Image: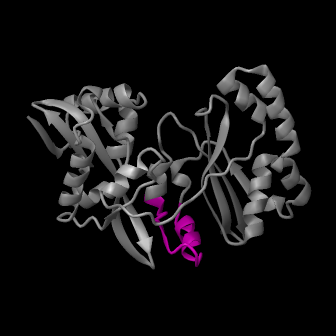
Amino acid sequence: MIEIKRVYLNNEEEKNGFLELMEKCLTPKTSSWLNWKYLENPCNVTFDNKPFIFGAYDEEKLIGIRPFMLQQVIYKDKKYITAQPCDTAVDPNYQGRGLFKKMTLKAIEEAESMNINFFFNFPNVNSQPGYLKMGWEILHNKNESFLFDNFGKLVKSHTNNFMLKTIGNVLSWYFNKKRKIMKKHKINNLNNIKHIHNVDVDFFDDSFENLWKIKNFNEIRISREKEYLAWRYSRKNKNYDIVTMYDNNKLRAYAILCFSDRWKVKELQIVDFNYVNLEDIIGLIIYIIK
């Protein structure tokens, strides 16, 4: 008989079962990653330092996981506790039995008694239909944009076709947005820009959250308090850089960067940013490109 219940990750058996499902269904992960993401999250203090994770068990065997990352979301200056589903996996031998839906419904049921205000997610085109069937609503569509430095190399890494790589190089040169940005904009206040490699978690302070507070269009957002930022960017085996711009010791703009190889080529990701004026963030982006 399959049972759906909370997973607390308070013993090695549960942790190993979680990681085995990750390796079997998604991407291999380490125990340090698991501890960081689901056990060291500062929002867990809301629930006596326990993670908000649900699992499907066949007798004592963990056959499915549905973990949620707790976050503090601010809407019109009021804080809400929210849960974002992540890293869902079901053993291939048990797929097709509705376990994904059952674990989700169990989480929603328990959330009502735990003062979790709402759930949010960023589904892809494959998972979105399943969410909509369960009653989730689309709040906003956001496109992800890329600025290519070597589009031909990216094409070759995926196709191993020299002809397509050549075509990609020509198209990349013709539609080179990077070159257009560099020609159109100049950095007027380069001396105010600071770049810190492998940022230390002690670097973060209240100035980041204060910067978000003054932005009128950021009505709903993740709280950027220093405890959250120190946790978010303390992930082991992953280094983050931060580029900042100050004016009279006041933070005017920042961008947090990390490198990835998800496309089989080196990719620079801007994982978080904010600014007072548009020209400030343009200056940071030009600095990053250079």
Image quarter of the N terminus: top left
Residue 53 coordinates in the image, percent (x, y): 26, 46
Residue 185 coordinates in the image, percent (x, y): 87, 60
In the rendered structure, the answer to whether residue 269 lies left or right of residue 92 reads right
Q: Is residue 221 magenta?
A: yes
Please determine whether, in this image, residue 153 is positioned above or below residue 240: above
For the point 25% across and 29% down, the residue is 17
Q: Nearer the viewer, residue 106 or 186?
A: 106
Q: Nearer the viewer, residue 31 or 123?
A: 123
Residue 180 coordinates in the image, percent (x, y): 87, 53
Please determine whether, in this image, residue 115 is positioned above or below residue 18: below
Residue 136 coordinates in the image, percent (x, y): 35, 61
Q: Residue 42: tell me if it is visible.
A: no
**Image quarter for residue 156?**
top right
Q: Is residue 265 magenta?
A: no
Magenta segment boundaries in residue numbering: 205-227
For the point 56% across and 54% down, the residue is 203
**Image quarter for residue 155?**
top right
For the point 18% across and 58% down, the residue is 110
In the rendered structure, the answer to whether residue 17 lies left or right of residue 251 reads left
Q: How many marks?
A: 0
Colouring = one colour
